[in-house]
Image: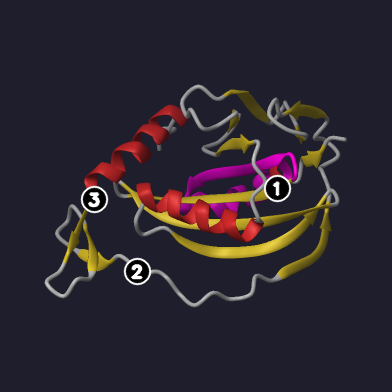
Amino acid sequence: MKRITFLVFCLMIAGFSQAQQRAVTETGDEVILFEDGTWQYQDEDYQEEKEIPTNPTEFEKDKKSTFLLKSNRFNVGIYLNPKVWSFKKAIDNPDAEYQFQLKDGDLYGMVITEKVEIPLETLKTIALENGKAAAPDLKIVQEEYRTVNGLKVLLLQMNGTTQGIKFSYYGYYYSNTNGTIQFMTYTSQNLLDSYRAECDKLLNGLVEIN
């Protein structure tokens, strides 16, 4: 399989939202119309809110993650292994601060930071709604609170489809009084399990800088 570059992926995400149409039935229900002629109710995926479980494991940065990449927006940073990951300032996504790519694989990442404190429960809603703009079938398939280097973070795995490509977002969400970070990895759904260990090593490099 040819490697999908970060830019191409972002363009697909941006373009996919334009391929969907929303409509209202005679009874007033909102529906989403898909290119293949199928449809679904707008609120079909919403389910009763369940309590988010807490993982009892204490997660720490990997010993080989020795390079500290600092945010320029608030007091967080990411320890990573530069032999495994390439990174640069985000240029393809205006909302992102950094973008990442696994040097030997089809795994990507991005960091979105802002100087606003947002409750983790609200971040969950924001992440899902923003993702649905590109992939209306996006669903949360895993969620839990974790303690990572002493920080309480929210882990979300979201699966969706865009232009026929089934993809997964797998990332951490964290906020403090100085700002908020959405730290995500992503790849195709069939590859995530094989990359999950690398995802966790990268994500577990998240630290707060005092």
Mark nearest the camera among 3 and 1 is 1
Mark 2 to mark 1: distance in Å?
28 Å
Q: Are marks 3 and 1 in contact (CB under 8 Å)?
A: no
At horizontal 82% and vertical 43% (from top left) the residue drawn is 61
Please give the label number shown on residue 175.
1
Q: Is residue 147 above or below residue 95?
A: below
Q: Secondary structure at mark 3?
A: loop
Q: Earlier in the sequence, mark 2 or mark 1?
A: 2
Q: Is residue 94 magenta?
A: no
For residue 65, what is the image quadrant? top right
- Tell me the crowding category of disc 2: few under 14, some 14 to 19, or many 20 or more residues within 10 angstroms, Cα based: few
Q: Secondary structure at mark 2?
A: loop
Q: Measuring from the top left, give residue 66's x and y in whole percent.
A: 83, 30
In the rendered image, the quadrant that contains the N terminus is top left
At horizontal 70% and vertical 47% (from top left) the residue drawn is 175
Label 3, on which residue? 20
Please give the label number shown on residue 43.
2
- Tell me the crowding category of disc 1: few under 14, some 14 to 19, or many 20 or more residues within 10 angstroms, Cα based: many
Q: Which residues are magenta?
A: 177-202
Amino acid type of the residue that numbered disc 2 sits on in the rendered structure: Asp
Q: Earlier in the sequence, mark 3 or mark 1?
A: 3
